[in-house]
Amino acid sequence: MQLVINALSKTYPNGVQAVKNVSLTLNNGMFGLLGPNGAGKSSLMRTIATLQEADEGTIFLDDLNVLTQKKQTRQLLGYLPQEFGVYPRISAEQMLDHIARLKGIGNASERKELVDALLDNVNLYKDKKKRLGTYSGGMKQRFGIAQALIGNPKLIIVDEPTAGLDPAERNRFYNLLSYIGENTIVILSTHIVEDVSTLCSHFAIINEGEVLYAGTPDDALLEMNGKVYSKSIPKNAVQQYKNQYHVISTQLKAGSLYIRVFSKEHPGDDFIPGEPTLEDVYFYHVGEKAAINIF
């Protein structure tokens, strides 16, 4: 499968242009959509998920017109929004059975086999009789993935899936998404750089509705190689350095303030060459507003 987004734009009635002329091509595998909060990620995801209209542009899933053939698209789509509600008094097993019925799986034994398999895949089988209201945040996220997988979708969209998860839950989620992404297009929308660097073979950086970069993490790091430098500076000298250098980020570590700068040549002034990271790429493209700024 291939998802092709071409010249997509969306402006809300209040005048906010949330998506600006976005063009992307996605193949099977994990695709990261990286950007700060309010960058337009959720607006783009909702448009792809047929939950809102676009003003301009096209989206095709192979030969399927996503914007006009919504019913057919939804049959191939699994969607886990950033915030989703659960019925607190119903069990995971009962809820998935209900969703499977809505998706057209009429045979009861077939539904039971599917539900059990999904709950096993997301490590919730032993908790399938528990009410959803008793689930932890990580368990609810895994339940969300299970419901998104019903119907063997060809396109899965997950919006900020690891926000609020503890490290162990996040690691389980990483493994699950990686497994799913082997034979499916999975769009991972996040503001957490680690999510993209851990999971995604391709990614795009979006800010203020515009795609600022699209490619592979390896290519992005290669472009920054030999152009990132770091230095410990006095806390009261931050603005001075910002005036003089292209400061990517500032960060306080163990009481010392470190800055990272982008420069095509060695900037001198006791700067030390640094190994570029995907965070450097991200901060370089989105600018200071999303950087780790202490002051």
Image: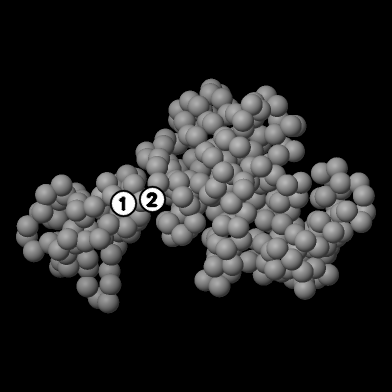
- Name the spot of residue 123 as percent of width and height, x first: 70, 68
Tell whether 292 sits left or right of 170: left
Mark 2 residue element: helix
In the image, what residue type sits under mark 1?
A: Leu
Q: Is residue 67 visible?
A: no
The residue that disc 1 covers is 221
Mark 1 residue element: helix
Q: Quadrant of residue 233?
A: bottom left
- Name the spot of residue 63 as percent of width and height, x first: 64, 26
Tell whether 190 sits left or right of 95: left
For the C terminus, give its image quadrant: bottom left
Q: Which mark is residue 20?
A: none
Q: Are marks 1 and 2 in contact (CB under 8 Å)?
A: yes
Q: Which mark is residue 217?
A: 2
For the N terminus, give its image quadrant: top right
Q: CA distance from mark 1 to mark 2?
A: 6 Å
- Name the spot of residue 77 as percent of width and height, x first: 68, 41
